[in-house]
């Protein structure tokens, strides 16, 4: 936690596309009233970790701090959840990624 080293786990939009109910729910393609919650739960159970992406990361030292997340939104670029206080898109898509590139880690 103090080193900033870890893994980033995220719902992978390309992998989710194969799961109709999850895709529709996550990207809010249908109003909640039209969603089939039983089918959604079944798909989530069957998909398991198959719909996740995972990459090793190292957070920049100046970003290793506990800051309340606040209200969340979906980034219009990468379609992942992010703190709305960061602006119109997530930090990574806005060009201010908190992650160090491989060459920066050495």
Image (cartoon, rainbow, N blue to C red):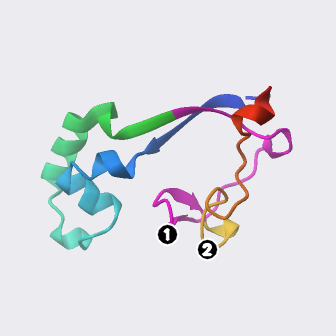
- Residue 79, given in percent of the width and then of the height, sits at 45, 61
The image shows a total of numbered marks equal to 2
The residue at the point 61 percent across, 68 percent down is 84
| Depth order, front residue of 57/39 | 57
Instruction: Identify the secondary structure beneath mark 1.
Output: loop
Q: Is residue 39 left or right of residue 95?
A: left
In the figure, 5 relative to 79: above or below? above
Q: Quadrant of residue 66?
A: top right
- Residue 106, given in percent of the width and then of the height, sits at 80, 25
Q: Where's the N terminus, which quadrant?
A: top right
Q: How many C-alpha atoms fall within 10 Å of the one at disc 2: few (<14), some, or many (≥20)?
A: some
Residue 41's disc number: none
Q: Is residue 69 magenta?
A: yes
Q: Is residue 82 left or right of residue 106?
A: left
Q: Is residue 98 magenta?
A: no
N-term mark: 1 or 2: 1
| Depth order, front residue of 64/50 | 50
Instruction: Identify the secondary structure beneath mark 2.
Output: loop
- Residue 13, given in percent of the width and then of the height, sits at 37, 52
The residue at the point 70 percent across, 33 percent down is 102
Magenta residues (range): 55-83
Q: Which residue is mark 2?
A: 88
In the figure, 75 relative to 101: above or below? below
Q: How many C-alpha atoms fall within 10 Å of the one at disc 1: few (<14), some, or many (≥20)?
A: few
Q: Which residue is mark 1?
A: 76
The residue at the point 51 percent across, 57 percent down is 81
| Depth order, front residue of 37/106 | 106
Q: In the current view of this chain or complex, which residue is farthest to the right?
A: 62
CB under 8 Å between callouts 1 and 2?
yes
């Amino acid at each position: 936690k103090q080193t900033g080293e870890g893994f980033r786990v995220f719902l992978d939009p390309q992998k989710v596309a194969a799961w109709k109910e999850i895709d529709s729910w996550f990207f809010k393609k249908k109003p909640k009233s039209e969603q089939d919650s039983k089918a959604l739960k079944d798909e989530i159970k069957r998909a398991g970790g198959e719909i996740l992406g995972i990459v090793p990361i190292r957070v920049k030292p100046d970003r290793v701090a506990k800051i309340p997340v606040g209200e969340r939104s979906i980034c219009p670029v990468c379609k992942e959840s992010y703190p709305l206080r960061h602006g119109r898109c997530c930090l990574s898509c806005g060009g201010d990624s908190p992650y160090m590139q491989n060459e920066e880690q050495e």
